[in-house]
Amino acid sequence: MMNQSPDSGVVFILNPVEICLQVFEFVVEFWIWWEMFFFFSSGSWWEMFFFMPRKMGGRGLTSVKDCYWETILDFDDYAHTDVNGCLKLVSERCDYHHSPLNKLFRKAADIRVAISPSFEVKEKQDKLRDSDHKLKIEQGEFDRMCEQETISKKSLQWHNKVHLPAALEMKIFKTRQQICKCRARLKRMNKTKDDTCRYCHAARETTAHLIGGCPALRTNKYIYRHDTLCRFIHHSIAKRRGFKVEKEWWKHKPQAIMTIGQGKSEEKLFWNQLWNTTAKTSARKPDIVWIRHDKILLLEISCPLDRNVIIRYDEKMSKYDELVRELKARYKRPVYTKPIVIGATGMLPLAVDAILDDLEISAWQCQKLVAIETVRLLDTLSLV
């Protein structure tokens, strides 16, 4: 590429390699300043999202700050293990306060005080970010729950198993950390004076309230999310057992009653059917009833707030006790209630994980569907 100066008439030859190097240097410098401006604030959700490992729910990017620390520590180790002792001799002969080498040694000593010697820099930084994040009341609630013994580790790891665009994953992360543009958060930022829910006008408008506790959204938004998960589970069971269904689950339209086989091998799949019972009970309409030749399964599906998954699971287990006794006496075979409770942003109890494994249904896909529908709910409200 050639360019001629209009004043001197000198022809400059622009090397494409030099141009690429200059562009690369500009991009690197821009990214470093961007990270310093946004991410160096301790405990910020940006730092949590971008730099935490994938297994801990973040994007798993490498921080320039961590690389800088590791470089200083590596050079400090090299200087103190130098066979000839040249670097150590130079540092001793130079002024302690003004020598760049001595400043680097002091910086390395400060870093070693900040991190434990038993950890690598990145591992220690990840633990510090995680511990700072969990101290926050709302933003750390999901991560604190994942430490409970009744919660599956898949609650933080499911996004590694499914493909999600980066923009969608960030929206799921923001919803999980309860940092959407709800009125309660805007009031804390002094951008509004009223934090009452604009839909039900009865409670504070928090992220948790919008995705699982607003009475005004329960009749349409929450039911659509629930029915989407029900259709996926119904399609997965029907397709695996040989029922005639569509190839893709999103095209699946569940029939009220589906039958396959004859005689002892006959199986039936009921969708949202009201069962008649001799005893008076309001719990007579489970989401899916699967009648097999050896047993009957009552599948009750729910997508509550992440904090309520264990409570809702216990409620569902005892909800259909009367119907279980009726069906056991009618069909002369064991009847089991199988609650499938998945949190609004992917919280998965261990008991539900075992149920999905027994049914040969992908827990990752169920978590993905629920989380996407939760984000779609907030998208329609222009809050994420």
Image (spheres, grey):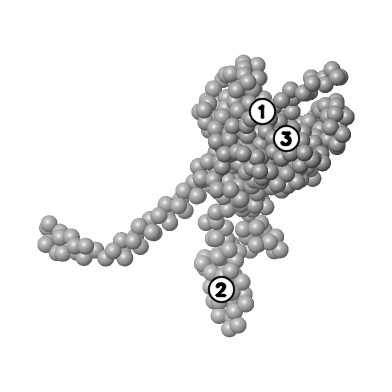
In front of the other: 58 or 159: 159
The answer to whether 115 appears left or right of 281 in the picture is left
Q: Amino acid at mark 1?
A: Ala
Q: Dot 2 corresponds to which residue? A: 91
- Hey, what amino acid is under mark 2? Ser
In the visual, does 130 lie left or right of 165?
right
Residue at which label 3 appears: 268
CA gap between label 2 and label 1 equals 83 Å
**Callout 3 touching callout 1 (CB < 8 Å):** no
Q: Amino acid at mark 3?
A: Lys
Snapshot quadrant of residue 213: top right
| Label 2 or label 3, whichever comes before in sequence order | 2
Q: CA distance from mark 3 to mark 1?
A: 10 Å
Secondary structure of the residue carrying tag 3 is: strand
Q: Nearer the viewer, residue 199 or 195?
A: 199
Q: Does the image show residue 16?
A: yes
On screen, 106 above or below 147? below
Q: Who comes first in sequence, dot 3 or dot 1?
A: 1
- Left or right, 327 with reference to 23: right
Residue 140 rendering spot, x and y as whole percentages: 67, 40
| The N terminus: image quadrant | bottom left
Tell me which residue sits at (21%, 65%) in the image. Answer: 13
Q: Of helix, strand and loop, which one carries label 2? A: helix
Question: Which residue is under mark 1?
Answer: 256
